[in-house]
Image: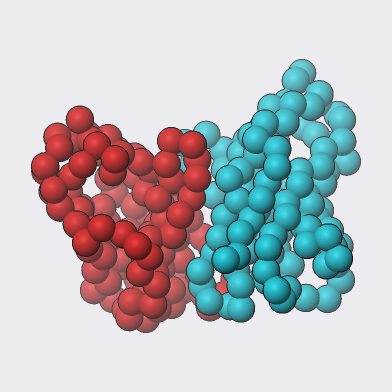
Chain colours: A cyan, B red
Amino acid sequence: AQSVTQPDIHITVSEGASLELRCNYSYGATPYLFWYVQSPGQGLQLLLKYFSGDTLVQGIKGFEAEFKRSQSSFNLRKPSVHWSDAAEYFCAVDTSGTYKYIFGTGTRLKVLA
Amino acid sequence: DTAVSQTPKYLVTQMGNDKSIKCEQNLGHDTMYWYKQDSKKFLKIMFSYNNKELIINETVPNRFSPKSPDKAHLNLHINSLELGDSAVYFCASSQGVGELFFGEGSRLTVL
């Protein structure tokens, strides 16, 4: 069965430090890949997505992600974290365009001033 | 103007009651979804409708019944509420397979 793994439940970084959130998926072909962010008490907002083409994708709020087929990974990065980035981050995949998005368990990001 | 709006935002009710959550999207999308987010923040799809037709129906108790009167609305009715139904329920929409647009969620607490 398809699955999405986010190995880090919590990550704490200092403001201004770089960030990498990990995401691995289990699926035979290349799925559609997404990163969403959820601020407390809010719904999820799309940060970026990958369907095909250039494996390094740029998103909103200065985030980027790199698709690595050999590692079945789609890690999210930001060079310099801001205090407002503190939130829950979800990786998601849609396999074969089925509308059946599968979400990872999320990574909670804490930012120290 | 909110793209995906859900009402109510909070529900507190007793076990055994019936409740409904309404969702409306003004994005012109053809697909709408209900997701359940549990206390550990795990998001699981429950239902999806494409142009008013049910296309995804996960293993959800039949106490949960979605209804899509038109492609801009997707409601969720829950009968005989149980403690385990306490969660945040998110409505979302998309145009084809692509970005999901989420509502702000409806927090259901069953006492």
Residue B15, picture quadrant: top left
- Percent position of residue A66, x then y: 84, 58
Quick one: B79 or A78, which is closer to the camera? B79
- Percent position of residue B86, x then y: 30, 39
In this view, the residue farthest toward the front is A1
Quick one: A65 or A3, which is closer to the camera? A3
Can residue A84 be spotted in the picture? no
Quick one: B11 or A74, which is closer to the camera? A74
Quick one: A81 or A103, which is closer to the camera? A103
Q: Is residue B38 left or right of residue A33?
A: left
Q: Is residue A18 left or right of residue A28?
A: right
User: In this rendering, is residue B22 above or below B57?
Assistant: above
User: In this rendering, is residue A83 above or below A95?
Assistant: above
Q: Is residue B76 left or right of residue B102?
A: left
In this view, the residue farthest toward the top is A113
Which residue sits at x=86%, y=71%?
A54
Which residue sits at x=33%, y=76%?
B54
Which residue sits at x=43%, y=35%?
B39
Q: Locate the N terminus of chain A and report the quarter of the image it occupies.
A: bottom right
- Percent position of residue B103, x then y: 43, 53
Which residue sits at x=15%, y=52%?
B79
Can residue A100 be spotted in the picture? yes
